[in-house]
Amino acid sequence: MSWDQTFAAQIHLPNGAVATTLRDALGYIDELSETERKTSEWKNARDAIAQAADEVGSIWFARIAVVRAIQMNGLETEHARNELV
């Protein structure tokens, strides 16, 4: 497993941090409330991150899943609004 794989483009997180690696994104998800972590968007993001770390999934898909979870949960920052563009 390689949790230190780097995203092609950083992800601006709602808490003001920036995720540049799978580990960063997973750390952010782990800090969410249990209720938030249980949403399908965050479950999908966590699964995509784990698959990318196992090298059976794409780091690009993991990035998209995290950005979508941020957007779908209304947590987006000004930067996040333009992440997928």
Image (tube, helix red, strand yellow):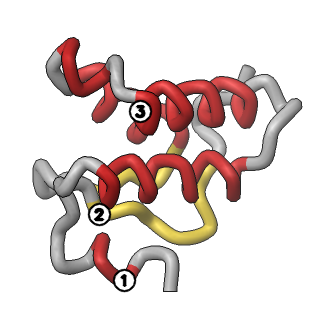
- Amino acid at circle 1: Asn
- Secondary structure category for the residue under label 3: helix
For marks 3 and 1, the one nearer the N-term is 3
Which class describes the residues within 10 Å of circle 1: few (<14), some (14-19), or many (20+)? few
- Secondary structure category for the residue under label 2: strand
Q: Position of residue 18 (x, y in %)?
A: 29, 57
Q: Height in image: 83 above or below 4?
A: below
| Contact? badges 3 and 1 (CB < 8 Å) | no
Residue found 25% across the figure and 48% down from its top: 73
Residue found 65% across the figure and 43% down from its top: 5
Q: Which residue is mark 2?
A: 12
- Amino acid at circle 2: His
Q: Height in image: 66 above or below 67?
A: above
- Amino acid at circle 3: Trp
Q: In the image shown, does 75 or 58 lie closer to the viewer?
A: 75
Residue 46 tag number: none
Cα separation between marks 1 and 2: 10 Å
Q: Is residue 25 left or right of residue 64?
A: left
Q: Nearer the viewer, mark 3 or mark 2?
A: 3
Q: Position of residue 31 (x, y in %)?
A: 20, 24
- Secondary structure category for the residue under label 1: helix
Q: Which residue is mark 1?
A: 82
Cα separation between marks 3 and 2: 16 Å
Q: Height in image: 50 above or below 83?
A: above
Which class describes the residues within 10 Å of circle 3: few (<14), some (14-19), or many (20+)? many
Query: Which quarter of the figure is the N terminus placed in?
Result: top right
Q: Which residue is mark 3?
A: 42
Q: Position of residue 16 (x, y in %)?
A: 13, 57
| Contact? badges 3 and 2 (CB < 8 Å) | no
